[in-house]
Amino acid sequence: MGGVTSYAAAPPPPLPLPPPPSAPDASATHDIEEKDKEKQEPTDWLNLPCPVPFDELQREAYTSLKPELFEGLRFNFTRPLTQKFSLSHSLSMGVLEVPSQTNEVFKVSSSHYEFGANFLDARCMLIGRMLTDGRMSARMKYDISDKLSVKVNAQLTNEPHLSQGMFTFDYKGRDFQSQVQFGNNAFYSANYIQSVTPNVAFGVEGFWLGHQRKSGLGIAARYNSDKWIGTCHVSSGMLSMNYLQRVSDKIALGTDFLYNSSTREAVCSVGYDYLLRHCRLRSRIDSNGCAATYLEERLNLGVNFILSAEIDHWKKNYKFGFGMTVGEL
């Protein structure tokens, strides 16, 4: 018999196996574990963290948004003589802005040399400066104990009634910090800041200036977490708020808002702080159209190159400065 050909349909191919479940994201898992840990661990209200000092309430935002801009040439050299004592030399050549009643900016050339001596110890710090125009300044900090410290700031000038002196006492508690200041011209001030939760702190301040018969009160609040920091400060008709977001270990974004009730003026600025391997770049722009950039480039160990630029189109004020820093305190 001849062969028989079968026309039956071939069996269907097997269905593909489902893909294996993907591994969970490490960052998401870490965040979930942290949240579960926070839920499980109750807050110890008798063991709250110590807040930052009241005068350093906005230090992170100011460091990122308001670097020390300058115009002209600047050169700083620090020479250590021992592990605790060093000498410093500073040369500056630039311009000074003369106040005027109009929006125009008047500048005059200026230059000076500054000689300094520094003593740094585990409990004591002494810093002295002398300029070629006759001005002298001195700063001292001494830790009486782990909780109590005293600071002295003084500045002497050839011009009458412009010399200043200030004494400051700082006390650091377990979950609070307080400060008392008094100086010349019958100046007295005190402030206190208290942690109310592991992330929130509230503070209050007051001052009295006897010669001018002026006084003022202020309140402040600060929220600090691993990702962002926010502060609000109200004092003598001034409202100041700032916010700093840590995008990563090297990048931070910040913004601040300042309102003066007496002049009814408000200024808002935004900026960033970018930390590279050998340099640090900080830039900002405000609501008045003023843009600024500050660059610190590390050329070698103890040698830094600095560039500073600021552009104010509204006032037609343009600043550019460069400098170098050799040695560290």
Image (cartoon, grey):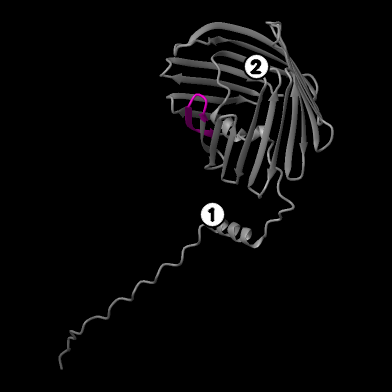
Which numbered dot is residue 76? 2
Q: Residues in magenta? A: 259-275
Q: CA distance from mark 1 to mark 2?
A: 44 Å
Please give left or right for residue 221 compared with residue 194 in the image: left
Q: Quadrant of the N terminus?
A: bottom left
Q: Nearer the viewer, residue 79 or 33?
A: 33
Characterize the local packing of mark 2: few (<14), some (14-19) or many (20 or more) Cα atoms within 10 angstroms.
some
Most extreme residue toward the left is 2
Residue lying at 51% horizontally and 57% vertically, measured from the top left: 25
Residue 251 visible here: no
Query: Looking at the magenta stretch, what is its main secondary structure?
Result: strand
Residue 27, horizontal then vertical, whole percent: 54, 54
Residue 257 visible here: yes
Q: Nearer the viewer, residue 156 or 326?
A: 156
Badge 1 or badge 2: first in the primary sequence: 1
Residue 265 magenta-drawn?
yes
Q: What kind of element bears circle 2?
A: strand
Q: What kind of element bears circle 1?
A: helix
Residue 16, horizontal then vertical, whole percent: 35, 71
